[in-house]
Image (tube, rainbow, N blue to C red):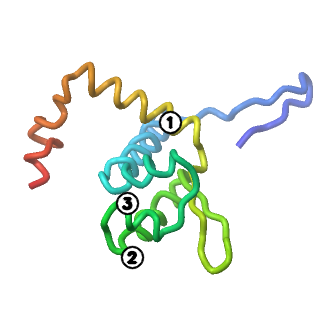
Amino acid sequence: MTMESELAGTTVEPPVSETTALSAAACMFRSLGDPTRLAILQHLTMGEHKVVDLTAHTGLAQSTVSAHLSCLRDCGLVSSRPQGRASMWSLATGSELLDVLAAAERLLAVTGDAVALCPTYGEEASR
């Protein structure tokens, strides 16, 4: 939320606590922390798709894909528009999300995918 300064005619952002900002960032990363949601987002980088296209791509049930799309929509990452009886899904924040995903790929390359071996969050921890 912004406030207009009457004297200078400039926009001033209200202060945000560090805790609030970090909490929001953690929530965003949790929304990106599911392999299926990442696969859906990656597929949507190629353009709009219907749920049926995404189910074919992921091999998951329609209800599962819809639940992930709902999560991503609630997080502000995807949006939909009606097309006949179906909905066309697309990235809501295309360039910013692509920047985050590209940065993640660079970080994984630099760390040698060490996060996959992490005892807390790695592949073995989720089993």
The residue that label 1 is drawn on is 98
Label number found at residue 70: none
The residue that label 2 is drawn on is 63
Closer to viewer: mark 1 or mark 3? 3
Quarter of the image with the N terminus is top right
Q: Are marks 2 and 3 in contact (CB under 8 Å)?
A: no
Q: In percent of the image, x 41 and y 27: which residue is there? A: 103
Q: In this image, 112 relative to 87: left or right?
A: left
Q: Helix or strand or loop: what does disc 1 sit on?
A: helix
Q: Earlier in the sequence, mark 2 or mark 3?
A: 3
Q: Helix or strand or loop: what does disc 2 sit on?
A: helix
Closer to viewer: mark 2 or mark 3? 3
Residue type at numbered disc 3? His
- Whether 45 is drawn above or below 112: the answer is below
Mark pair 2, 3: CA separation: 14 Å
Label number found at residue 57: 3
Mark pair 1, 3: CA separation: 19 Å
Residue type at numbered disc 2? Ser
Q: Are marks 1 and 3 in contact (CB under 8 Å)?
A: no
Q: Nearer the viewer, residue 14 or 126?
A: 126
Q: Helix or strand or loop: what does disc 3 sit on?
A: helix
Quarter of the image with the C terminus is bottom left
